[in-house]
Amino acid sequence: MFGTPKAVHRIVAGALIASTILLRPSTSRAFDNVTLITDFGYNGRHAHFFEALDRGYYRDAGLEVKIVRGQGSNDAIRQVGAGNAMFGFADAGTLVLARANDQIPVKLVAAVYRKPPQAIFCREDSGLRKPKDLEGNAIATTAGASIPALFPAFAKAAGIDAQAVRWVNASLESLPGLLATNKVPCVGQFTLGEALLRSQLGPGAKLVRFAYADAGLSYYANAIVATAATIASKPDIVHRFVEATIRGMKDAFADPAAAGAIMQRIVPQVDATIAKKETEAAAELAQIPGQPLGEIDPARIEATLDVVKGAFKLATPVAAADVYAPGFVTK
């Protein structure tokens, strides 16, 4: 009645090929393989990348994208600089330091967090109420993170002694538990991670947040980065990756709950509700009225350089042209 299995297979295969050609006429060529490395692990704040992946936006752009776990912004920058990943999701201030001190030729091609997300979270019952109280206390964070890297800038703005704080290295996954079990009074975490930290605390426990932005700091944070060589030799791939990612950002920010569900489906260990809240926080950091998502403002680049230069002695001078490449975000 339905013909032979082989005949059915040929008919179905032919229909699929035909529909693919009709829907995606540009995909007859081979896909360009691309690896993206995150700043830290897989978290809800990365949902816009996974949304672009899940909805086929990268493939629409002729890209076969693999997303791998990073171990901090510094790690992501080094991996991109070494050619182990074409793109990274990394902190702009950390990139300035890597460029100045290690001569890693990596640049921003699109801004994602256009406001500072770095923060220190402490248990309220630890008695820490103001930034000065951080002196003499331990803060757990991950090695290579932007939070300790930029802490001197926060300390200077807040009027505290950066050297009086003791940093404890820990894995990203262990930070909520260390705080919940009172192993440390404070942890370094992006403001996007507040929902996760609160979910791990016991009944009645509260958090005190010391956000770097609250001290008056204003700079770019996480962005999409690539090497100067990639930007020069493969600008079309850079443009396509940026545009596809921005499509994912638009969808994720418009429906954070759906983004959280996609994130959990692809990475089951990520809680969908936490991912939703992190996506909402990412949207607040990324969206500036009147400016396209991802756009890099030269004035904000200069402000980022000023923050880093004001807190660190750089081994070599760094100019704006050294740390970002314009033109990859459609206005």
Image (spheres, rainbow, N blue to C red):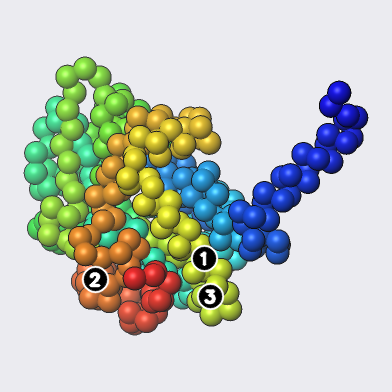
Earlier-in-chain disc, 2 versus 1: 1
Q: Are marks 2 and 1 in contact (CB under 8 Å)?
A: no
Earlier-in-chain disc, 1 versus 3: 3
Indicate the secondary structure of the residue bearing disc 1.
helix
Q: Which residue is mark 2?
A: 300
Residue 80 placed where, x, y %?
53, 63
Which quadrant of the figure contains the N terminus? top right
Please report the residue visible at 39 percent of the width from the left and 70 percent of the height from the top: 330
Q: CA distance from mark 3 to mark 2?
A: 23 Å
Q: Nearer the viewer, residue 172 or 136?
A: 172
Q: Amino acid at mark 1?
A: Arg
Q: CA distance from mark 2 to mark 1?
A: 24 Å
Q: Which residue is mark 3?
A: 235
Q: Which residue is mark 1?
A: 240
Indicate the secondary structure of the residue bearing disc 3.
helix
Residue 161 placed where, x, y %?
16, 56
Q: Nearer the viewer, residue 270 or 22?
A: 22
Q: Amino acid at mark 3?
A: Pro
Q: Amino acid at mark 2?
A: Arg
Please report the residue visible at 37 percent of the width from the left and 81 percent of the height from the top: 321
Please report the residue visible at 89 percent of the width from the left and 35 percent of the height from the top: 6
Mark in front: 3 vs 2: 3
Earlier-in-chain disc, 3 versus 2: 3
